[in-house]
Amino acid sequence: AAGVHPAMAAAAVLAGTWGSAISPGTSHNPFVADLAGTDVMSVIMNEAPAAIIASFVCIIALTAISVIRKEGPSDDRRQAYLAELSEEEQNRTFKINPIYALIPLVPLVMLVLGSKQIAILPLTDVPTAMITGSILALIATRTNPQEVTKKFFDGMGSAYGSVMGLIVAAGVFTAGMAAMGLTDALIETMKGSESIAKFAGAFGPFLIAVISGSGDAAALAFNGAITPQAEAFGMSIVDLGSLAQMAGAIGRSMSPVAGAAMVCAGLAKVSPMEISKRNAIPMLLATITFMIALFI
């Protein structure tokens, strides 16, 4: 209804999905933390500043493209959109419940304030924060506890299955790379230069994610095979692991074959390629920015 071109609006939404890469709920941060022998919040606090800087670069680039292509807010597009809606849809009001809106932030606030770096609250782990948020949501919404419990464990099972499936798939792929001798060859090449290691960590997962549509598979495969050798390249496991997983997530945000891209394209009624073309330059700039900011 804001009058933005549908393809540009969908591109902005898709670009925003890679923010989940700095969430404690994603599979990559626990994976990197386990490799480095540290806690999840230490990994996130290390990568978050660079990710935030990269997101601003992405926003500026997308805005510039919108202005250049004249795809920003337009009264004509706004009127055309409203004309397609029924009278009931036009008169529908959307009311926000502030309490409901704030509850999902509680677990995140607990994890940040209870991290080793900030330590305002006692050290908090992910399960504790998650359960606390669920209990608060149950109290605020006054939902049937039996239904909430079922949904809670359904969600846990689904998440566990998805995460374990990715890790197993990455492990099989990693074992295949090692059996072929590819892992050793890559490690020897990257040992010769820290710059090569940085670019490989950034643009290897990035390109695989663009081609395959999955940033998870690309990042987990790289982190499983290469990241444990990070110290041989003059980097820490946390830095190289964060670079790989963030680059994979960014690459997925410009892939025309990613599931999220197809969903956004379907909602906006445009081709996934239209979204990919608009996100190409912003995502490339975001990857380069993240790589530079992470190692400053």
Image (tube, rainbow, N blue to C red):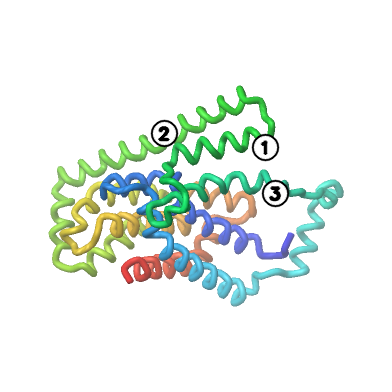
Which structural element holds mark 3? helix
Residue at 77 percent of width and 68 percent of height: 76
Name the outermost residue toward the bottom: 68
Residue hosting label 3: 98
The structure residue drawn at horizontal position 60% and vertical position 37%, both measured from the top left corner, is: 136
Tell me the kind of residue under disc 3.
Pro
Cα distance between the residues tagged 3 and 2: 31 Å
Is the N terminus in the top left, top right, bottom left or bottom right quadrant?
Answer: bottom right
Question: Earlier along the polypeptide chain: callout 2 or callout 1?
Answer: 1
Residue positioned 43% across, 58% down in the render: 250
Residue marked by disc 2? 160
Residue 203 occupies quadrant: bottom left
Indicate left or right for 129 with 218 as reference.
Answer: right
Q: Which residue is the site of mark 1? A: 140
Depicted 219 relative to depicted 234: above or below? above
Residue 87, compared with residue 3, is above or below; it is above
Along the horizontal axis of the image, is 167 left or right of 96? Answer: left
Residue 97 image position (x, y, % from top left): 72, 46
